[in-house]
Image (spheres, rainbow, N blue to C red):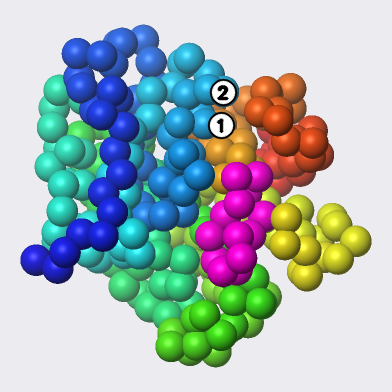
Amino acid sequence: MPKTSVVAVQTTCLDPDQMPDAARRILFIGNSHTFGNGSIPVLLRQFSPDILAAMVAIGGCTLHRHWHEGPARSILNDARFKWDSAVLQENGWWPSKAPDDSFEYARNFKAEIERLGAKPVWFMTHPYHKFARDHKNAEGHLDSAAMYENSRALAERVAGELAITVAPVGDAWWAYQQSTAEKADTRDLYKDDGIHATAMGTYLSACVFYAVLLGKSPVGLSPIGFEQAGRIQKIVADVCGV
């Protein structure tokens, strides 16, 4: 088995005895777009005591790899956790590089998640920023707008053909970008590598999951120190239709 670069889990949320029955139990299966900046699950817990979110997140991981390696499926299938939902987060490059592979493993995970009585949720990832071009040269030509459209197309396919609920993180990122004076050039949500989220980018993503998982508007959530929080909340509410 290849060496796991990062396995990020919240040990408190992965102890069944510390997970109240009344809470919504959410398992995130993903990579650094889930665990970065303290993680989306941690932010969700700060937003609402009704959510208990845990994660199995491996740096750079694809759903293909999660299916065949690592602890994701054993944790998913552990009956003690009684998951309500499982979030599937693909490698951000895969909607452009290998969308059929992504779709195949979305279908595999959907069957397993629903067999357990839980609900699958698709994490539509954000596109990389255009200044990440050199960093991702080995993966092929980088075009942010094309990456966004590819991520959107895969999300629509997953929703339409597999009936999986989509958390439109990529749509919310793109809407935020377009709302700024610099539009696609703005770096507010991106770290210096042009790939990973700043803390504010992770905040935006967490707002999307709050809206999708609870069906509630994120407007009025704690800003957690972000000056742009109110604006982000309104954009997410509009994108998610809540």
Write the start and end of the magenta stretch as one range: 189-201
Q: Position of residue 83 (x, y in %)?
A: 28, 29
- Farthest right residue? 181
Using the rendered view, name the quadrant where residue 11 is placed: top left
Is 187 colored magenta in this rendering? no
Give me the residue at 67% from left, 23% from top. 222
Q: Is residue 191 above or below residue 28?
A: below
Q: Is residue 199 visible?
A: yes
Please give the residue where the numbered disc 2 appears in the rendered image.
47
Q: Are marks 2 and 1 in contact (CB under 8 Å)?
A: yes
In this orientation, which residue lies closer to the viewer: 214 or 184? 184
Give me the residue at 63% from left, 25% from top. 216
Using the rendered view, name the quadrant where residue 203 is placed: top right
Please give the residue where the numbered disc 1 appears in the rendered image.
210
| Horizontal arrangement in the rendering, residue 228 relative to residue 165 (left or right) | right
In this orientation, which residue lies closer to the viewer: 213 or 110? 213
Q: Is residue 127 above or below residue 19?
A: below
Is 199 colored magenta in this rendering? yes
| Horizontal arrangement in the rendering, residue 193 relative to residue 11 (left or right) | right
For marks 2 and 1, give the one nearer the viewer.
2
Q: Quadrant of the N terminus?
A: bottom left
